[in-house]
Image (tube, grey):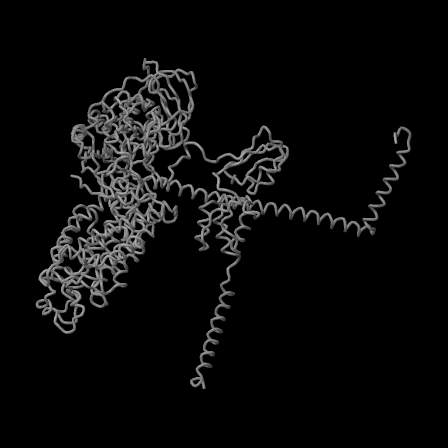
Amino acid sequence: MRVIHDIPGGIHPPERKALSRPGQLRELPLPNRLVLPMRQHIGAPASPIVKEGDRVLGGQCIAEATTSMSVAVHAPTSGTIVRIGAHPIAHASGLDDLCIELETDGSDQWLSHSGVTDYRAQSPETLMAHIQQAGTAGLGGAGFPTAVKLLARERGPIETLIINGTECEPYITADDTLMQCEASAIIEGAQILAYIVGAANIVIAVEDNKPDALAAMTAAAGADIEVATFPTKYPSGGEKQLITILTGKEVPRGGIPADIGIVCQNPGTAVAVRDAIVHGKPLTHRVITLTGEALTSPGNVRAPLGTPVETLMEFAGFQPPMHPRVIHGGPMMGFALASLAAPVIKTTNCLLAPTPDELPLPQPAQACIRCGLCAEACPASLLPQQLYWYAQAKDQQQLEKHHLFDCIECGACAWVCPSNIPLVQYYRASKAYVVDARQEKQRSENAMHRFEARQSRVAHEAQEREAKRAERKAAAAAKAAASGEDPVQAAIARAAARKAAQAETADEPGDPS
Amino acid sequence: MSLMTNSSPHAHRPLGVADVMQRVLLATLPGVLVLTWFFGPGTLVNILFGGALALLFEALALKARRRDPWQTLNDYSALVTATLLCIALPPYSPWWLIAVGIACAVLLGKQVFGGLGYNPFNPAMVGYVVLLISFPVQMSSWQAPRGLAEVPGLLDALEALFLPAHYDGATAATALDLWRQNKGMMFEDMARTAPEFGRWGGRAWEWVNIAFLVGGLWLLKQRLFTWHAPGAMLLTLAVCALLGFDGGSSTGGGSMTFHLLSGATMFGAFFIVTDPVSSAVSTRGRLLFGALIGLLVYLIRVFGNYPDAVAFAVLILNFAAPLIDQYTQPRVYGSQKEDDA
Amino acid sequence: MLSNDPLLAALLALLSLGIIFGALLGFASVRFRAEGNPLAEQVNGILPQTQCGQCGYPGCRPYAEAIVDGDAINKCPPGGEDTIQALADLLDVEPLPLDAEHGVEKEKLVAYIREAECIGCTKCIQACPVDAILGAAKLMHTVIADECTGCDLCVEPCPVDCIDMIPRHSGIAHWHWQLPSKTTGIIASDRAAA
């Protein structure tokens, strides 16, 4: 029996999981139009390899990965590329980004694909190449390119693969549903992942508020895969927090779980890996929770990537309240969408449409009363209060001293704050400010070196010119001394002689003057 | 459709500043009721009068600072300051004493620094200390408790407040006063014979302290603050008293129960020391903060000039709180030891 | 004699103390002399090194030396608020608002040469203080964007006015959250309806 540890801090917001009926998975009817952004993951955006007007089949690669930290995009179904250009996307900024717009033809014709028959006969590198080609990114919400994550095996021996089925955020039940409906696929994916990283142990982590998922995974797991459960608390599902809960170890600051021999993956990612390896099928669909009291029929749906949010909202019966809000993600870490035309992407695990009664609009922030409830709630044992004061003062040194970059932005501090201060926004803005300031420092040092190099180059050139002039002068003086005549007088005499010669030839006939 | 966009998190615990302050006020109720039982309605009248004045002064200050008064007054913090200060003041104090105290507490202790959350010192203690030093006579004339004199009524209270020149109350020394001024009596004898002493601590004051302890424990259960600061203070005070108790000689420190149940100990521990704005930030810091306050209270009571020391001890430690914060950062996840930058 | 004459004793004591400490200080000022002007180095390290001259000095180092000699710290627009604050912290003086006479704080810019119009005169290359323009006489000139500090000293010398200053950061890759404004709140009509 595994010893379960506790993490410091944490909160218990109302779970509201039953609202989206976990365990029942619906298929979305094929939308007319799909919009596929180039940026669906952490890293460099993909680059389109199709043109407007091209006809594509399902599973066809339409954008390739541009760097090693990039992920390809595939067409979820057959259709015609109608536009490649800027389109609203699901991003906190509300800005547009480059997207490929696909008009579906309804026939859902797919490119033929086949996977490997026995993955154990392949080398891990080959399997990782398949995973990369299939456009796999982490489906837990962050979107880290999976093939890059699996490179962790090169950092050191990996002992444990953890499948993170915690899903600690309220409202979201996508992983819960996946675990109930496709337990064996997750197990198969986990085994493939464990083979790739060389992990001897696999642990499936499920919070204790998901008894059905727990039962399904335990039944599918068999004898050598451990299914661990632990008390529900937000944010137990954070990678670092989960590792501490299951193993008691902490990921060193500035490091990754691979440094202590652990790799974590989301259950959805495990299924995507299985599809890529066993069926050769790229990542084109995902399970999304549609929830919130503004929807008449909330639930979990498997939708093609690129489905516009408004299509899903219609499918779930969205009744916009007085101040409509549609949140991409969960209530703690998700961001509010600026436009419903934005499409769902690989990191969309939930679309939450609350009513103002359900999730009241934020109240105006009041003064911080330094109550310390935020520090009690912080799972990383930070001092959110001090970070707040230093964020306002833009005090880079103190922000770094108080470990600003160890903040996982879970939002527990802002949830408890009696003064309604949007603490996480302060930290996000401060992180950007500090990164910017470091970059500026680097640039200005660089500029100083270039400036000084230029100064010395200019000085050097001036010096050379001076030296040459001195040389010429010395040479002239030497020549004059050698011939014994005054060079100036000699020059005047030469000039007079030339003038006389010119005057003679000017008198020749044919000269107009 | 125009969508609302705001930053995460989108859910929030339904507890605001006003809720916190209201619960603090509620927790003072047992103590105030016991005070009223033993000393009459003086404290209640003071609280009502002081509360009204506090709201007025705060509103004026906010107007001067060009802020919206309603939003800030609604957070109940001025009322809490006034209540805490008026509990500490002698009942049947004249109106001008209360007015000066409240003005100092609200204006000098809070508004001048930028309002709630910006004050480095506990506002109620600022007001109290200003009064203590400026008007020592009025601040040391405590009404004699039930059993030693007749308890005044409501009219008496109003007369004392508004017509102080007319009022003639029966005052008595508190147990702490007596002990401080004691020249030759053994502590045990004094505790047994002097009418100002009760069963464990000061007469009437032991019950007041117990009532405030009850209120404080309720706040602790409500998780409005952690046990670290009040616990450390009481523990340190108890340990110091235990160590300093030499069997009850005439020159030694008082007994442990005497210190814990006299004067403003429990009130200070659960309502003054726990004021989050002016105390240390981390739990380790709060342990240190509370412990040093406990130590100072004991030292000033035994060796200092004033009978009760909570106010001074708290203010001194308010000075020290930023330094304590510097050196008591908690260990961050993933680091080996503290301050692992 | 000294015990009878306290005034003389006091005078002698102070004099000898003064001589001893004066000698110590003199020795220290020679033995521990620092090369160059270390404070000016530190000030120069804080300045943004755009070498643009908006402060009135021909580059950042001369301004740094002037600051050490007592000049105001608020003359650098590319450095902006953050630089003024850092200088104020270093020199233990009051931070002042940016002196508008020398310019205003703008977003970060880089120079961009419209190559179709460039005549290859090298005037901009000579003007650039960090050699961020690539080119030669009668050949195409182009700005190396990563090295350009946005000082805009190249714009004026160009005889065909083909240099634009464009924002360095734009688009989604450079977007980030801003600090919450202090006056966020629901507007009156929202409060009524909500």
User: Of B271 and B327, which appears nearest the observer?
Assistant: B271
Report the residue at 83% width, 52% height from top.
A484
Using the rendered view, name the quadrant where residue A427 is placed.
Answer: top left
> At which x and y percent is residue A216?
17, 28
**Residue B50: image location, x then y, percent:** 23, 53
Front residue of this view, candidates C143 and C57:
C57
Report whether B51 appears left or right of C18.
left
In the image, C144 versus B321, the foreground residue is B321
Residue at 34% across / 52% down in the picture? B112
Q: Is residue B127 left or right of residue A101?
A: left
**In this orientation, which residue lies closer to the viewer: B267 or A378?**
B267
The answer to whether residue B242 is visible is no
Q: Is residue B17 above or below residue B306?
A: above
**Residue C170 appears at what percent x and percent y?**
45, 33
Q: Is residue C156 visible?
A: yes
Residue B185's quadrant in the figure?
bottom left
